[in-house]
Structure formats: C-alpha cells, structure tokens
Amino acid sequence: MQNEKTSFSAVLGVVLSNLRKSKGVEQGDMAARMGLSQPSYSRLESGKSAFSVDQMFQAAKALGTTFEELNTRLIHNIEELQANGIEVVQPVRGNTSKAQKQGNEMGQLVAGAALGALLFSLLTK
C-alpha cells in the first residue's frame, strides 16, 4: 500500500461508525442525538465533512462515552494506520490558498467503507 493517504476526519468517522454499531445505534438515531440530519451525519461518518470539536463532544455523549475515550480510540487507529504505511493527513479544504497548490499532490485518499475495511483488517491481525 504505497502512497495511500486518508484524513483525520475519515479515521474519526470509522471510529465513530464502529463504536455506534457496537452499541446498536442506527445512523439516524445518532444524527438525532447530535441534532443533525441523517445525511449530514452520514457525511461526517464517511469522512466527506470534517468534525468540529463541538461535534466530537456531542458524538461521545450520544454514544455514552467520554471525549477522552473517543480521542484515545482515534489516536490508536491513526497510529495503526501509520505503522502500516498509510499517511494520515489534513486535506486542504475549500478555497484556501493551499487548495490549488496541493491539488494533485494528495495522491489517492482512502475514505469511507474502504478505510473501515482497512482498519478492521489491520486491527484483527
């Protein structure tokens, strides 16, 4: 897996998805607990939108856990990915001055279901 990259938001989305599923919470219920529409929450969980700090705290509360536990899981997953040669990056978003510069330099970004499968395979070795 050379030059594969993913974003911090995508990793957080997979962490939340796995935790949500382990607690038997449907995506629509999670969205409602956070005061979001289901499509908005889905974009967060798939890594297509970035979480705010407020949303991270809301997500932890909605799942009956702490921000610290959520953060620990996130860090653990990031470390696992990095140990397996996958770079975790902060993608340039929107119309920032770096957006056009970075353009094609991002390489292949692993997101959503592919990242979930990758994390699962790495963590079950």
Image: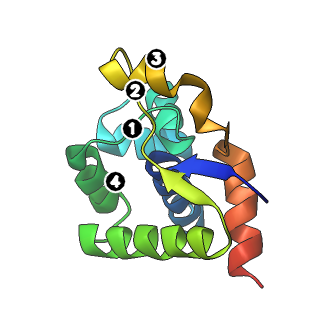
| Residue matched to label 4 | 59
Q: CA distance from mark 3 to mark 4?
A: 32 Å
Q: As displayed, is residue 113 above or below residue 102?
A: below
Q: Earlier in the sequence, mark 1 or mark 2?
A: 1
Between 108 and 73, the residue placed more toward the observer is 108
Q: Amino acid at mark 1?
A: Ala
| Residue matched to label 3 | 100
Image coordinates for residue 118, horizontal then vertical, percent? 73, 62
Q: How many badges with numbers are in the image?
A: 4
Q: Residues within 10 Å of mark 1 (few under 14, many from 20)?
A: many
| Mark 2, secondary structure of its residue | loop
> Residue 50: which numbered mark, if any?
1
Q: CA distance from mark 1 to mark 2?
A: 9 Å
Image coordinates for residue 6, horizontal then vertical, percent? 58, 49
| Mark 4, secondary structure of its residue | helix
Question: Is residue 106 toward the left or the right of residue 29 in the image?
Answer: right
Q: As displayed, is residue 99 above or below residue 88?
A: above
Q: CA distance from mark 1 to mark 3?
A: 19 Å
Q: CA distance from mark 1 to mark 4?
A: 13 Å
